[in-house]
Each structure stands twice: as C-alpha cells, then as structure tokens.
Amino acid sequence: METDIDPHGLIGRKAFARDGTRIGTVDEVYLDDATGVPEWAAIRTGLFSRDAFVPLGPSDVVEGTLRVPFERALIRDAPDFGVGRHLSPQQELQLYHHYGLDLSGPAAGDGPGAAPDPPPDREFGRIAGAEEA
C-alpha cells in the first residue's frame, strides 16, 4: 500500500470518516520497517482515550485534515492493539481483514482478493506521536 502522505505533518491533524463526521485526532503514524512507507495511523477517538488504527493507503489529506474512506462505526470497531509499540504481522493482518483490504496485491495470493499471511519480517514501527512531536 503506497501513500504520498507526510507522516510527520499528519500528527495532531483532525481525522474524518467517509461521511464527513469527525473521528478524532491523529495520535501516531506507523511506518513499514522495511520500506519506510507510512501505512497506518492511530486516531485518538476520545472514546475512553482509545486509539483506532486506520489505513493510510486509501486515505487522503484534504485541507489539512485526514479523510479516511470508511464509516465511523467501522473505524471505531477496529482491533485495539494499544499504541507506542510495533504492529506485528498478525496485528496488521487483522487490520487488513477488518477493513476488507487486499494485502496481497493483484498478482499474489490464492485467488482474487486473497490476503495471505504477511511475511514474518514485515513489522510496522511508529514515528513520534502527538505527545513527542
């Protein structure tokens, strides 16, 4: 999943769901350790100080805000892994399944839309979060 989003500039920005409702504020951005590409953002929803992970690949930055192309309810129901540490390959796979995203790309997998297990060496480290920026 590739994105042109500047991860450092994203911290502290407001995030909005597909229908324009506010989700929360970008708390942390997670980069693929192997490529350095920003792939996930942790959004502080304000709901019991919980962070919800959202994929950055299909998201856009519009007028200084993050626009996530999913419904607010789906985002708030995303698996909660806590923040401040790496996302494991298994956690990433859970997030891909939750959002119905294709991890494999068009030429990989066992069939159309198949999402294989991620490579064991693929991890996602965070960059400075809001409290550290």
Image (cartoon, rainbow, N blue to C red):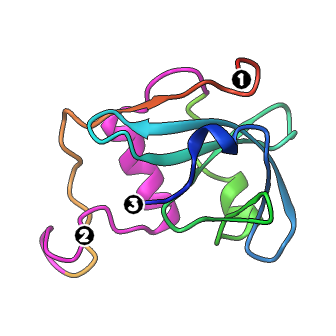
Badge 2 amino acid: Gly
Q: Position of residue 23 (x, y in %)?
A: 81, 55
Other residues around mark 3 within 10 Å, as few (<14) / some (14–19) / many (≥20): few
User: For residue 49, which quarter of the picture?
Assistant: top right
Task: Name the kind of residue labelled 3 in the image.
Answer: Glu
Residue 2's label in the rendered image is 3
Q: Earlier in the sequence, mark 2 or mark 1?
A: 2
> Is label 2 in contact with label 1 (beta carbons under 8 Å)?
no
Please report the residue visible at 68 percent of the width from the left and 57 percent of the height from the top.
75
Most foreground residue, 105 or 129? 129
User: Which residue does the numbered mark 2 point to in the structure image?
Assistant: 105
The amino acid pointed to by label 1 is Ala
- When the figure is inspected, residue 62 is found, relative to residue 42, above or below; the finding is below
Residue 31 % position (x, y)? 44, 38
Query: Along the horizontal axis of the image, is 69 left or right of 97?
Result: right
Using residue 122 as the reference point, say whether residue 108 is left or right of it: left
Q: Residue at left 22%, top 50%?
A: 117
Task: Please say if 48 is above or below 23.
Answer: above
The spot of residue 109 in percent (x, y) is 15, 68
Read off the residue under disc 1. Answer: 133
